[in-house]
Amino acid sequence: VGLTAHKQDERGGIYTLTATYTDQNAHGATTLTDSEMIKLRSAKMRPIDADAHVGIDRWGNAYGSAKNKSYILLKNIDLTGIKSLTYEYGAEKRSGEIVVRIESLAGPVISTAKFTPTGGEDKRQTLNGKIDKQISGRHHVYIIVQNREKTMDDLCKLWTFSFNQ
């Protein structure tokens, strides 16, 4: 089956695969059944494709008005072979950083990328955040927007982010 069933205006969709196995019930034993479900997502995502967002206002297909310590949560992301993340962002007048943690908001930091003002939230620039150590397996990924001066108002707008090998 090709992964082409998504709508034309979607960037690749999200596919959910479910596999279930039931044994043969040999020699009068109780039948055992197990199942597993995984989501396949595009490597390039929009914030609206995230599992959750806190402290960020949604504007159409992007998030804007990201406040200090706001975050986007992506559940069960396979980080095997991922070496960096690329962000498409706009920031009117604030500087800050995008920090990526795994498992929880207090979990280990795997990437940090500093952003600078672009002159407006709609003036997009690309930012790359390197992952310094090799990570494998599925993890909950928290993409956190923060400002060291603890400025609480609008820091940036995120248009897309990509996981790169």
Image (cartoon, rainbow, N blue to C red):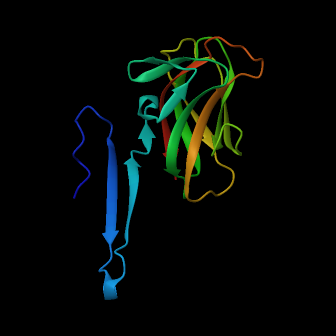
What residue is rendered at 23% in x and 55% in y? 2
* Quadrant for the N terminus in the image: bottom left
Q: Is residue 35 left or right of residue 3?
A: right
Note whether residue 164 is visible. Answer: no
The answer to which of 64 and 27 lies nearer the viewer is: 27
Q: Position of residue 82 (x, y in %)?
A: 55, 52
**Residue at figure coordinates x 64%, y 48% from the top left:** 131
Q: Which residue is drawn at 60% across and 38% down?
A: 142
- Give the x, y percent position of residue 113: 66, 34
Which residue occupies the extreme bottom position in the image?
A: 27
Up/down of 23 relative to 62, above or below: below
Residue 160 visible in the shown view: yes
Q: Is residue 62 above or below residue 101?
A: above
Q: Which residue is located at x 38 percent, y 50 percent?
A: 40
Find the residue positioned furthest to the right: 149
**Foreground residue, 156 or 30?**
30
Of residues 53 and 117, the one nearer the viewer is 53
In this rendering, is residue 17 above or below 84?
A: below
Image coordinates for residue 156, horizontal then vertical, percent:
58, 19
Query: In the image, residue 83 lies at what x, y percent?
Result: 59, 51
Q: Quadrant of residue 109?
A: top right
